[in-house]
Every structure is written in C-alpha cells, then in structure tokens.
Image (spheres, grey):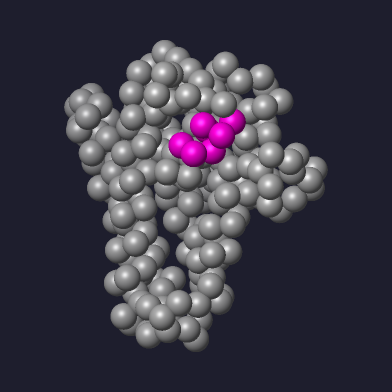
Amino acid sequence: MDEDRPLPATWTGDPLVRELLRRGIGGAGPWSPARRVGDDHLAEAEGDVGTAIRRLTTTHVRLAASSGLLTSLGGAATMLLTAPAGATGLYLVCTRLAASIAHVRGHDLDDPVVRTAVLLCVLGPDGSELAEHTGIDLQEVSLLTGLRRLPVEVREQLDRRIGYRLASRAGRRGVLNLTKLIPVVAGPIGAGADSITARSVATYADVAFWTRSA
C-alpha cells in the first residue's frame, strides 16, 4: 500500500489498534492493566524509576519468550493457526510494557498522544520510520513533542498507519519459513525472537518517555 494515500475508512487494522490499547493498557481478565503493573514494579523498587523499568523489562521479556515458545512448538503442522495468536500475544505484551514504562515515567495513559507513542514503540524501528514519514524530525525533537505538534487529524491518520504496519507484521509471521518447519526446534527460535523484540520495545519506550513534559 502506498503510505502517501489515505487509508480506507473501514480497514482491518483499526480494531487491532483499539484492542491493543484496550487490553494492553487497560487489561482484561487476569491480564493486569499497565498502570497497576507499573505501580507494582515501582513499589517493589522502592520508588526507583530506573530499577522499576529494568524489572518491568525483565518481566515482559520473559512473558514474550513464553508466548513465542508456546506458539512455535507445533512447527509447520500448527503454525498457520498459532502464528496470528502469537503475534497478537506479543503485541499485547509489548503494548503493556511500553505503557507501563510511560506510566512509571509519569505520563498519562489516557492522553491520546501518549497512546500513539506507545504504539510507535511497539513497532520499534518501523515506528521511528513512520514518525519521520509523518513529518517528525526525531533528530530535532522528542517523539512526544513531535506528536503534540501534529494536527489531530494527522495523528489519527498516523494511528491508522500504525495499525496497518502491525497487521502486516502479523501476516508476515504466518508465512512459512525453514526454521518453523521443524517442531520443537521452532520453539526456542520463536522464544528468542520474541524476547529480543520485547527488549527492543523497552529500549524505545525508555527513550520516548524519558521526560515527564513534552
């Protein structure tokens, strides 16, 4: 898709973004909300933000690894069924991780700008590219400052493009490749890849939400 063209009004990435924000930030069932997770880690760290973020990262890297392991163990026989679930699970882990870091850094998770920044962190390098494509010069301003300077309609369009990128990634995870043709061997590979992704998201979030004001 040409990213300079407007996206259709009813494309499938919008529900994905809504669900990630709803569940990844607000929680669902036994899946605790980002605020509570952030507060718990901050309390355990006795108010030390840096320690809390390191512990948040460790917790979510382990969750991502577990998700990657469980959704990859079936190899080719089950991959077409489990790959979309694995991608969604990883996105939820990474969304809550980035949102928890934002919360620990003192940012309001109800702020639409903060939520957009959370999603861009989930995309990692793709998020930085997308932000710059939208007109944010990350060499000159912070991500939050750049997002706040965007007109509301441009930021909303950016949210939808983020959803497109995430949905495209989920589709690519379902494509057969040689490493996932072998049951059991695929499990550790999936776990390793997802843990690396989660750690990268934590790095991006720690930079994006470094300061309270933007």
Q: Residue 28 or 89: which is nearer the viewer?
A: 89
Taking 190 as reference, is 146 left or right? right
Residue 79 location (% of width, % of height):
50, 77
The C terminus lies in quadrant: top left
Q: Residue at x 30, y 63 (%)?
A: 192
Residue 170 location (% of width, % of height):
55, 60
Position of 179 relative to 126 (above/below) = below
Q: Residue 23 or 97: which is nearer the viewer?
A: 97
Position of 129 relative to 185 (above/below) = above
Position of 96 relative to 152 (above/below) = below
Q: Main secondary structure of the magenta part?
A: helix
Q: Residue 182 or 26: which is nearer the viewer?
A: 182
Residue 101 location (% of width, % of height):
36, 33
Taking 13 as reference, is 62 left or right? left
Q: Residue at x 33, y 41 (%)?
A: 202
Residue 133 location (% of width, % of height):
56, 34
Residue sitting at the far top: 213
Residue 108 in sight here: no
Tell me, yes or no, whether the highlighted magenta stretch contains residue 133: yes
Q: Which residues are magenta?
A: 128-134
Tell me, yes or no, whether the highlighted magenta stretch contains residue 84: no
Residue 165 in sight here: yes
Q: Residue at x 29, y 72 (%)?
A: 188
Residue sitting at the far right: 9
Q: Residue 66 or 158: which is nearer the viewer?
A: 158
